[in-house]
Image: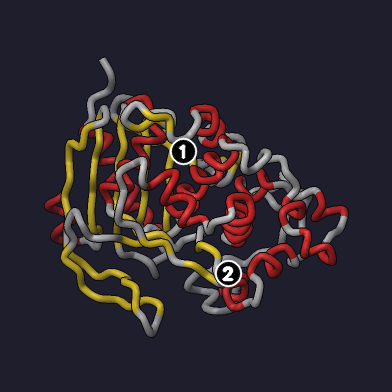
Amino acid sequence: MADQLAASSNIHAVLVARSGKLVFERYFSGSDQVPSFFFGSRVKDVIFDADTLHSVKSVSKSVASLAVGIAIDRGLIRSVNEPILNFFPEFADLRSPEKDRIQLVHALTMTMGLQWVEATQATGENNDESRMHRAADPSRYVLGLASTAPPGQEFFYTTGALTLVSAIVHKATGRPLDEFAREVLFEPLGIPDVEWSRVKGDTDAGGGLRLRPRDMAKIGQLVLAGGRWNDRQIVSRDWIETSTTSKIKATDDQYYEYLWWLGRARTNAGVVNWIGALGRGGQSIRIVPERNLVVAVTAGYYQDYSPQTFKLQFGVFRDVLRAIPPPG
C-alpha cells in the first residue's frame, strides 16, 4: 500500500497504532499548504518526516471537543446544556425566542439551526466562513445569522459553530483555546510542538491546528483509552463515551456527536465501527475500538472536493483494516 501511495498519490503520512504501540509509520513527499507571513499560506513541495508539522484542518474541531470536555470536567463550563447567549451578554440585541434556545450542545453537534454556507472551492469567497473571518466580531456574525430550524433538529455542518466554541472556552477559562489546550491536553500527552492560529484574538478551532502525525496518533490513542494517557486521566471517560456515541445522523452512512464523526467500514471479517476526526484535504484520525486500532493519515488534497479524493484517503484506512486480524 505504502509503495503505491509513494508512486501515485499526494498522501503525506500514514501511521498505525495497535494496542497502544506504533506499529507502522511511513512518510512521503508531495505538495502541501504551509504558513506564509504575507499570504496566510502557500503551496510548496515538502519531504515529510516524523518532525514535520502538518495542517490537520477540521481535525482541529475534534481536538477542540477534548478541550471543552476538560473545561466541563474542571467546572469551568457548567454543562453542554448552557444556552450559548449566556456566554455573550454583550449580544443582548441578538436575543430572540429561537436563539435563546441554542445551547452549547447544539454547536458541538452542528445542530444550531442557523443559516450557513460553508467554504468550498465552488463558493470562492462568497460564503459565510469567509465573511465570518472578515467580520469585526466573528462570534457576533455567527449568532446574527437567520434561524432556519429549531436547535437540535437538523444536522448542518457549520464551521461557524467552532468560532463560538473557541470564544466560549476563552471566556470560561480566561485563556484562548490554544493556550488552554496546550496546558491541559498537549503537554500531558507529551506534545511540545504545536501551532494553532488565531482569528481576531480567538483560536481558529474550525481548522487552524498544525500537528505532527505522531501527535495525531496520540490523540487517537487517548480517545481509544477512554481519556487516559500513561495512567493519568486527561479527559473524563464520561466525556469520551458521550462525545463518541452516535446520536445525530449526518450523512447516509455517518453520524456525528460532539465534533467527532462516527461511521462503519466493511472488512473481510465483517463490519467494524470507527470514530473519526476528519479534515479537508485528506487529514484523518480514525479509531477502531474493537480492533484496538488508531490510524492517522495526512495528505495534500486541500482544493479537491471530489468523491475520488475521499475514496483515496478512506482507501488507506480500509487497506490497514484488511491487514489487521480481528480479535481472537
Disc 1 crowd, CA 10 A, few/some/many (<14, 14-19, 20+): some
Give the mark toward the camera: 1 or 2: 2
Horizontal relation, residue 4 to residue 268: left or right = left
Upstream in sequence: badge 1 or badge 2 = 2
Image position of 293 with respect to 131: above or below: above
Q: Position of residue 27 (x, y in %)?
A: 17, 55
Q: Position of residue 209 (x, y in %)?
A: 41, 59
Q: Which amino acid does label 2 sit on?
A: Glu
Front one among 207 and 265: 207
Q: Which residue position holds label 2?
A: 129
Would you say the residues marked 1 and 2 are in contact, meaning their CB atoms lie under 8 Å apart? no
Q: Can residue 156 be seen in this view?
A: no
Tag 1 secondary structure = strand
Give the numbered dot on residue 263: 1
Image position of 54 with respect to 131: above or below: above
Residue farthest front in this picture? 174
